[in-house]
Image (cartoon, rainbow, N blue to C red):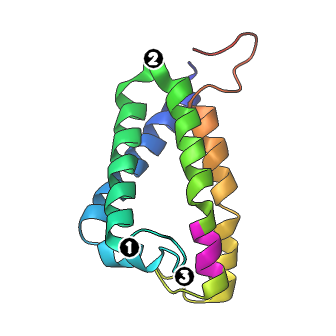
Amino acid sequence: MSALRTLARLALGTAMVGAGVLHLTSQREEFQAQVPEWFPLDEDLTVVGSGVVEIALGASFIALPRHKRLLGGLLAAFFVVIFPGNVAQYVEGTDAFGLDTDRKRLVRLFFQPLLVVWALYGGGWWRRGSRAS
């Protein structure tokens, strides 16, 4: 694996662990505000569950490079699954994490595809010449 791809994997894994920890601690209420009203589960349960998933995926992405392709795919899928919540934050005009205008909330939506690409790249999905493990 290239040094850049390894750095991308480690950086994203670290960011995911950090975000997951924030879900469970100091930013819990901010994350609760982002859970759409239509989502069928309790906001706190959703935030705790997604925090645990983020920690598990992030730590695995760091610690299990042998499974980077699978984990990069799972992270990309996770980013796709949570995207409707980001759209709901924009549509419902929910303020959280400094996203206090429609413009800021809209701009944020364009970063979600970049996270998907980052996860797939770090997972080795676009490796030249052969299929990555």
For label 1, count other residues whose C-alpha is less than 10 Å away and answer few (under 14), some (14-19) or many (20+): some
Q: Earlier in the sequence, mark 3 or mark 1?
A: 1
In the rendering, at what x and y percent does residue 88 appear?
61, 76
Q: Which residue is mark 2?
A: 66
- Give me the disc on residue 43: 1
Mark 1: secondary structure: helix
Which image quarter holds the C terminus? top right
In the rendering, at what x and y percent does residue 3 appear?
53, 25
Does 35 sit left or right of 89 as displayed? left
Q: Which residue is mark 3?
A: 99
Mark 3: secondary structure: loop
Residue type, numbered disc 2: Arg
Q: Can you say whether 101 is above or below 130 in the image? A: below
Q: Nearer the viewer, residue 73 or 26?
A: 73
At x 54% / y 48%, what residue is drawn? 78
Question: How would you classify the magenta stretch by its main secondary structure?
Answer: helix
